[in-house]
Amino acid sequence: MVEANPPSSDGESTLTDSTLRTAHMGSSAANSSILLTNSPGKENLHVSPPSTANYGDENACSAPRNVSHDRPTEPPYHILSHSQKWRLVCLVSIAGSFSPLSSNIYFPAIEEISLQLRVNASLVAITITVYMIVQAISPSLWAPISDSSGRRITFGITLAIYTAANLALAFTSNFPMLLVLRGVQALGSAATISISAGVIADIATPGERGGFMGTNAGTRMISQAVGPVLGGLLTAKWGFRSIFWLLFAQSSCVLMLLIVFLPETHRRIAGNGSTPLRGIHKPVWYWLRPPPSWKGVKTIKQPVVSSLSLKAQFAPLMHIFQKDIFVLLAWGSLIYTIWSMVTSSTTTVLLHSFPGLKQWQIGLCFIPNGCGCILGSTCTGWLLDRTFSRVQAEHRQNTGIPEATNIKEIRTFPFERARLRFMPYFSLCFVISTALYGPSFELNDLNRYFAANLVASLGLQFMIAFTATAIFSINSTLMVDYFPDGAASATATNNLVRCLVGAAGVSVIQPLIQAVKIRNAFLILTGVVVIFSPLLWVQWKYSAQWRMERERQKLSN
């Protein structure tokens, strides 16, 4: 399924005797040397390729070397073709979709579970809280392992745990068993989101990353859209245990696909894909059809696996206290919380406002939310790629940086301008949609204008989901830009903050609606977003400066 293409090796450069070699730029392993060549009437700029002697080692620096007349081209960021990258992204995105699917498919079955297990529905709701808490913490435990030991082995372990939990849940006979196994289910599924982000960072250039991250988020949102519908239909036909049988079958198939087709992508272990893999890092497919670039390689490099200490395990959490990261996570978490409050209150609000709706109809009412999430992530990924390419071209033109230079080596590159350009527009649409959402249930006589009010409310849910997911995609992509070598840990940190704040919001939305009614509840939430909106200005104006200060401090240490 995933087959690598050999890197190109053509390209020559003619040099004269008058040369000037510049120092190493950035903290990347690649050492680019800029050579100014004087010739009659003009000045030529040549860039020599990076040394590949220590490929994948961030701290390696190339020793000075003699200038050669035959200069090989710089190795590609990854040897996989663009179509092969897309197939790999789709595979890991499907694996990462189990976390939201397991959460949303469960909602329509709460009443049935309370009847079957003979417990109060409020107790069954506790299993949702447990799932969300473990969902927040789990990626922070697994992501450092992924960043140190590799994506493939961590993917396999977490999906195996998730598959086993689904099988056990299919035989649930009492409430304590359900409570514990839901936590185990979240322990295995939640980390797949951050690990899939790590795979994308391993194989994608910054210019490709926006589209891949959008696809990754969009795939998860598809499961979020169809989850409640599937849960309602399965529960009505075969009971709540059929939900877990379906999840068991799906996760088993995806686990087998990962074992067969997913190669190790961590750049410390696999480099740009041209380093031959062995053992657990090598997929079954590569045993049958190894990449062409592996041919002729006689010595297989020993995989570099970092030791994982307790300090290293929790080091990514310290990023929260960096100024640029804090502002980024604060705004993203606030938007995520409001969106979660809208989603979690949908069933209650609809039953209160439209008591004639049946359970399967309520499940269908989640579709606009899911469609908004899907379109929001895919459209934003396309916009991010286009904007990044435009800003990259402008930056190269203004600074004279040649095309051969890897953009991630340029510390002055305005990642924030490339990623945050559309953030104010999405945020404004989100505020307007949230402000109108609550009143849409109360503006008219519901019995007289039943259809119109339902359409208006669900249409606003679509807009809230679209804009919220767009903001999530921008935040997630920028976090990966900040930490390309620790993308899984960065995504896990993002997930931890969002889910914990979101869990707090979900716990108060029902009491808030009961206290002040639907209209006022969402007007209050809109006011909270407006109060914190200056974070957007702070992010645009100061994030680049704070990022460079953070990177200089890291280098000095």
Image (cartoon, helix red, strand yellow):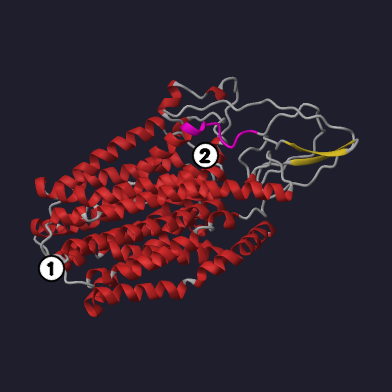
Q: Is residue 230 above or below residue 78?
A: below
Residue 146 appears in view? no
Residue 77 forms part of the magenta stretch: yes
Q: Secondary structure at mark 1?
A: loop
Q: Amino acid at mark 1?
A: Asn
Classify mark 2: residues with Cα within 10 Å, few (<14), some (14-19) or many (20+). many
In the image, which disc is placed on residue 447?
1
Q: Secondary structure at mark 2?
A: helix
Residue 138 forms part of the magenta stretch: no
Task: Please provide percent x and percent y for residue 133.
Answer: 33, 61
User: In this orientation, which residue lies closer to the viewer: 367 or 240?
Assistant: 367
Report which quarter residue 249 is drawn in.
top left
Report which quarter residue 114 is drawn in.
bottom left
Q: Is residue 197 above or below residue 353?
A: above
The mark nearer the N terminus, 1 or 2, is: 2
Range covered by the magenta-colored residues: 75-83
Residue 479 appears in view? yes
